[in-house]
Image: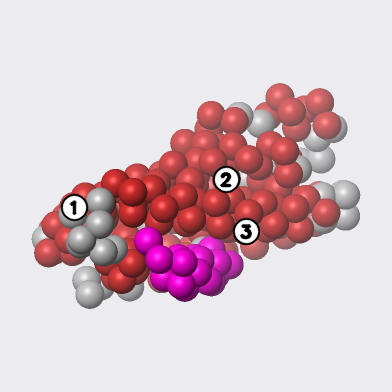
Amino acid sequence: MQLDIWLTMLVASILISVSPGPGAVVTMNYGLKYGLKRSYATIFGLQLGLFTQTFVVVLGLGSLIMSSLLLFNIIKWIGVAYLVFLGVMKFIEKPQLPDNTAKIKAFSASKAFVQATLINLTNIKATVFLVAFIPQFLNPNEPLLGQFTIICSTLICVDIIVMTGYSTLASKLKNVIKSIRAIQIQNRLTGAFLLVAAFFISTAKRA
């Protein structure tokens, strides 16, 4: 891949990652609740979902999803239902002020990882975008594996850096939120953003 093409892809990747989405919402929630270090379970879960989506698109299955209305809608509504479920759970979550020990016990890295992976895997808007985005940087005359490695590595590295930034900013507010009311507001805002993300994903259409 030529340097100018890669630089264009890098800039585009940064703009994609910075744009707020369900992944950013969940990452910030974990950063706010558990701090930067523990939010990496979420961040790496998102990357597994992104890697899988990118692999599917490069393999050509993305075009199959786009051409099959049934398959497209199944993935879309699974993603919408999952985000609605997460959003509602945040709304009804009982606000508490646990000490640090209780927070550590309540944290589950595996749960955070799986949750984040599913969020990206079922984000049909991201699939639609990748189907349109990735072919712009593929050269049919060059080995596909090498190009996939470059594209996927760029997308994932950029997303890790951006999500780390989101989590860092959120974790700085951790010491500010020290009341039941503040935690309740945080939960409801997170829930609201997830429901909004679900709505936007529900509007996704095949290109």
Query: Mark 2, mark 3: which one is toward the viewer?
Result: 3
Reading the image, the residue beneath label 1 is 61
User: Residue 162's mark?
Assistant: 3
- At label 1, the amino acid type is Leu
- Please name the residue shown 12% across and 64% down the image: 67
For residue 127, what is the image quadrant? bottom left
Residue 109 on the magenta span: no
Cα–Cα gap, marks 2 and 3: 10 Å
Q: Which mark is residue 17?
A: none
Check if residue 9 falls in the magenta segment: yes
Q: Identify the residue position indicated by label 2 in the image.
A: 43
Question: Along the horizontal axis of the image, is 18 left or right of 73?
Answer: right
Is 93 in front, or is 111?
111
- Secondary structure mostly seen in the magenta stretch: helix
Q: Where is residue 25 in the image (x, y as percent from the top left)?
A: 59, 58
Q: What residue type is labelled 2?
A: Ile
Find the magenta span and give its range.
1-20
